[in-house]
Image (cartoon, rainbow, N blue to C red):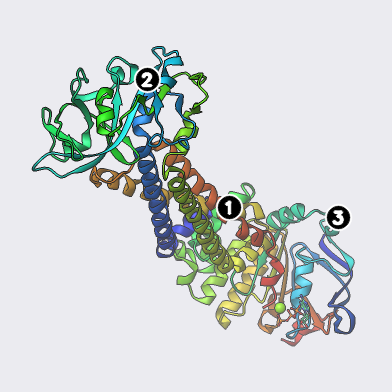
Amino acid sequence: MFLSLKEIKKEKFRYGLIIGMIVLIGYLIFILTSLAMGLANQNTDAINSWNINSVALNKDANTSLTQSLITNDNAKNAKLTKNEAYIGQASVVVKKSGLTKESAQFLGLKPNQFIAQNLKLSSGHKIQKTNQVVVDEQFKNDGYQLGDKIKFNSESQNYTIVGFIKNAKLNIAPVVYGNISNWKNIKNLNGPFAASAIVSKNAKFSMKDDQVKTYSISTFISKLPGYSAQNSTFTFMIAFLMIISLIVIAVFLYILTIQKIQNYAVLRAQGIPAKTLVNATISQSVILVVSGLFIATILTGITAFAMPNAVPMSFNIPILSAVGLGLILTGLLGSLIPIKIILNVDPVSVIGG
Amino acid sequence: METLQLININKYFGTGTSRVHVLKDINFTAKKGEVNLVIGPSGSGKSTFLTIAGGLQTPTDGSVQLEGDMLKNMSSKQRDALRLNSIGFVLQSYSLVPYLTVKEQFKLVKKVKKQNNLTNLSLTQLMEKLGIEDLVNKYPGELSGGQNQRVAIARALYTKPDILLADEPTAALDSERVAEVGQIFQDLAREQNTAVIIVTHDLRLINFADNVYKIMDGQMTLENDMKLAQ
Ligand SMILES: Nc1ncnc2c1ncn2[C@@H]1O[C@H](COP(=O)(O)OP(=O)(O)OP(=O)(O)O)[C@@H](O)[C@H]1O
Ligand SMILES: [Mg+2]
């Protein structure tokens, strides 16, 4: 600690540059992680808010809510309890004259089932009748208000916004919760269809119908369009950044150590144990990484504060801490190569003139 | 009393046809309180002799004893401890850590060897004697070659070593300073009962030596007559 701190103090510029590099890498990783989390949440926020454990879909729907239809026949065998609810999904374009059109996910609910009952509104009231909708707050940010009459697609039917709800997003689109009795019209369906899916809080829920298959919530989410691809893209980006930071830290420490070999050899000749020198290198890399990350954290905080709502970012402290910890471990790993050099320093090499 | 003893030391470097015999049947003893000067031309084996005496490298055959302990029986950790506690090294260059001030050079030693160093008072006195008492807050890069060397000497003496090994300690000093440093080595040998061994080609140090050895092509001879010649 003594040696590493003194050296950083003497060589402020040199170590400032290294810390600067780590700040940039850390900041980039933090922001990327937040963006990845933000996007992931926009895929699943609505689903997560329902607290469900299984989803029953048509077995030929390829685990896709959009493709799935459950007929009245299918539904009549199912024993529904208070833990199950119908969902009728339709992709819609929401229109109101004077305001921008918005692509949204219409989800039809039965007002007496648990999803409609448990919606946590930020303003307004729950759906009570047909032709009423509760919409994501994104609409509010875009100028829609309680009581506004909106239309879907090219339909002539008017729907009234009776409530706003926070973080209701599905597949990166805002959700419009409505009455399931409106769903078939919106989706232009003619036929004996009950819903797109039946969701349940019960993981073992089954429809007892061989045309319907029940999926666990994690399978269902991983099959959301684009969700897995998006997540693995981000995971790879973050992993590569980690590897790059490992290389940067290792290379810097390596160069710095090479420059100090002569001094280390003298210190070894004078009987200073290799352990003291190894500790100096390790503590130096920890000091560099931790102070770099500290600054990166402050920058990330400022960014979080300054970012407009439209940018999907989620600053998840536990996950960001884990990423930070990963970077510190990376720094430790990066100091392993120089340590090997220190252990092999030959004190004889500096004596001889 | 003999503190350092080298018995029938031979050192070879390389193998086969490139094998060189650098030290040939060297027998050498150093007593506490005495200054020993080993003089020889470049390439004669002075540094090799000094590093073997200090346990930094091992002889091809023969043995080194410090205070009766055989160096070759020690682990590398024990030899580290021995160098820290009992041996002081003064090298020609690079002796100081560039990013520590003069004061901090001693602090570093104190962090590793916690006890039995010079007291602050005696360190100050030593530094006054060496003319470096005003340099405590300077970095080695801000010192002249001679000032660097004097700090390195103080650094080596700080641990109160039993033996002090110096390789060309006066290379960067002018004649006046050489005389002062020579006197310091002599006083130190006397006052702290230290065995001082200096390898050099600087004949100006001869007057301060109790014993003068000559090393030539790896062979060492006692040449105390050289003192009288000066
Ligand atoms: N590690 C080594 N490998 C091979 N040869 C070596 C090694 N170290 C020293 N030598 C050789 O041993 C001989 C003595 O070297 P040494 O460094 O002891 O000389 P020196 O008397 O200290 O010279 P100088 O006054 O120039 O410092 C030289 O010929 C040198 O080339
Ligand atoms: Mg030499």
Circle 1 marks a residue in which chain? A
- Residue B218, compared with residue B31, is above or below; it is below
- Label 1 environment density (alpha carbons within 10 Å; few <14, some 14–19, many ≥20): some
- Asked which quadrant contains residue A51, the reply is top left
Circle 2 marks a residue in which chain? A
Position of A212 with respect to A13 (left or right) is: right
User: Are the residues under badges 2 and 3 in a single subunit?
Assistant: no
- Asked which quadrant contains residue A274, the reply is bottom right
Amino acid residing under circle 2: Ala
Q: Residue A246: x percent and y percent?
A: 53, 56
Q: Which residue is mark 1?
A: A333
Residue B121 shows in this picture: no
Q: Is mark 3 within 8 Å of ligand 1?
A: no
Looking at the image, do the residues carrying marks 1 and 3 touch, with CB atoms under 8 Å apart? no
Amino acid residing under circle 3: Asn
Q: Which residue is mark 2?
A: A85
Q: Quadrant of the C terminus of chain B?
A: bottom right
- Label 2 environment density (alpha carbons within 10 Å; few <14, some 14–19, many ≥20): many
- Marks 1, 3: nearer the viewer: 1
- Label 3 environment density (alpha carbons within 10 Å; few <14, some 14–19, many ≥20): few
Amino acid residing under circle 1: Leu
Please tell me how many numbered marks the rendered image carries: 3
Report the Cα–Cα distance between label 2 and label 1: 51 Å
Mark carried by residue A351: none
The secondary structure type at the circle numbered 2 is strand
- Marks 2, 1: nearer the viewer: 2
- Marks 2, 3: nearer the viewer: 2
- Residue B46, compared with residue A111, is above or below; it is below
| Front one among A155 and B16 | A155
| Front one among A155 and B150 | A155
